[in-house]
Every structure is written in structure tokens, then in C-alpha cells.
Amino acid sequence: MPEYVFKCKDCNQKFSIFLKMAETIDYIRCPHCKSTNVVKKYFPTPIHFKGGGFTKSTEEKGN
């Protein structure tokens, strides 16, 4: 299950919750003030490409 980070719009507290991918966030409440006025924060997943084939190599073979 992925961990999602939310921010409460009423008290500005950030909190995280483990949710299944298919679950909705309609019922999420802030653990600090119990408000349902929360938004999901987006953190891009870091990607690290390894190996050849992702960029043009400066050492071209066959020339």
C-alpha cells in the first residue's frame, strides 16, 4: 500500500496515511483538528535510469 501525504487546509498540518490504490480520499479527516478539508500533496517519484540506451553516448562505435 502506498503512503500518501495530506495537508489540512484549516490547521495547515501535514500528515500521512497508507491507502490502497482504489480507495477514495473522501472520508479522510485531519488527525489534529478532525476537519475533512484536506488536500493530497503530490511528491514525484524519483527515477534513476541505469545502463545504456537512455542517452546518446559520446563514444559511438563503428565510425
Image (cartoon, rainbow, N blue to C red):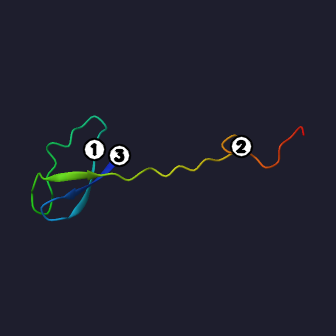
**Dots 1, 3 in contact, CB < 8 A:** yes
Residue 26's place in the image compared with 13, above or below, is above
Q: In the figure, is residue 20 to the left or right of 30?
A: right
**Comes first in the chain, label 1 or label 2:** 1
Of residue 36 and residue 53, the one placed in the foreground of this image is: 53
Q: How far apart, in angstroms, are the residues tagged by discs 2 and 3?
A: 30 Å
Residue furthest top in the image: 22
Q: Going 83% across and 43% down the picture, which residue do you hit?
A: 60
- How many C-alpha atoms fall within 10 Å of the one at disc 1: few (<14), some, or many (≥20)? few
Residue 39 percent coordinates (x, y): 21, 52
**Comes first in the chain, label 1 or label 3:** 3
Q: Amino acid at mark 3?
A: Pro
Mark 1 or 2: the one toward you: 2
**Dots 1, 2 in contact, CB < 8 A:** no
The label on residue 2 is 3
Residue 51 percent coordinates (x, y): 69, 45
> In this figure, which residue is indicated by the disc labeled 2?
52
Residue 9 percent coordinates (x, y): 16, 59
Q: Going 34% across and 51% down the picture, which residue do you hit?
A: 42
Secondary structure beneath disc 1?
loop
Q: In the figure, is residue 36 to the left or right of 49?
A: left
Residue furthest front in the image: 63
Residue furthest right in the image: 63
Of residue 23 and residue 1, the one placed in the foreground of this image is: 23
Q: How far apart, in angstroms, are the residues tagged by discs 1 and 3?
A: 6 Å
The label on residue 19 is 1
